[in-house]
Image (cartoon, rainbow, N blue to C red):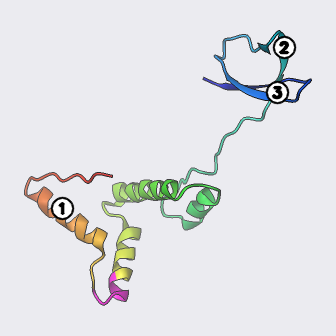
Amino acid sequence: MPLYCYINEKTGETVEVIQKMTDTHEYSRDGVAWKRVWLKPRMSVDSIVTDPYSSKQFVAATNKPDTIGSLWDRSAELSQKRADKDGVDGVKESFYDRYEATHHGTVHPERKKERGVKKLADQGINVEWGD
């Protein structure tokens, strides 16, 4: 349900009220009618990355105050899109390859985990990781 904002013109106090769109948009407290405050709609169209391969779009979509968890979630979604389209996420594989090259051939821990899960899945064993 939408959130509507009202202001008490005498005190300057504001309040946000959840009301149905079909409700009469009026608010009063202690017999005093409050005036509705009209706000611009808040929506974000820049947070959608249309090309999962574009680093520029990713940076533009994440260049705002956000949590690191949200950034990781968005990155995981794009990785999944690339994997769905190509069968494998080339960006992630490239990262793993660079990691191994700079760490004297040590396999990245996530790549180890993915290989282990795939090996078990080939044997009919399903592994799910908890968060």
Q: Amino acid at mark 3?
A: Val
Secondary structure under tag 3 reads strand
42 or 49, nearer to the observer:
42
Camera-near label (1 vs 2) is 2
Secondary structure under tag 2 reads strand
With 102 as the anchor, is 51 left or right in this view?
right
Q: Residue under circle 2? A: 33
Q: Residue under circle 1? A: 118
With 109 as the anchor, is 92 left or right in this view?
right
- Categorize mark 2 by other alpha carbons within 10 Å: few (<14), some (14-19), many (20+): some
Q: Which residue is most to the bottom?
A: 104
Q: Magenta stretch: residue 101 in it? A: yes
Q: Which mark is residue 34?
A: none
Q: Amino acid at mark 2?
A: Ala
Q: Which residues are magenta?
A: 100-105
Q: Residue under circle 3? A: 37
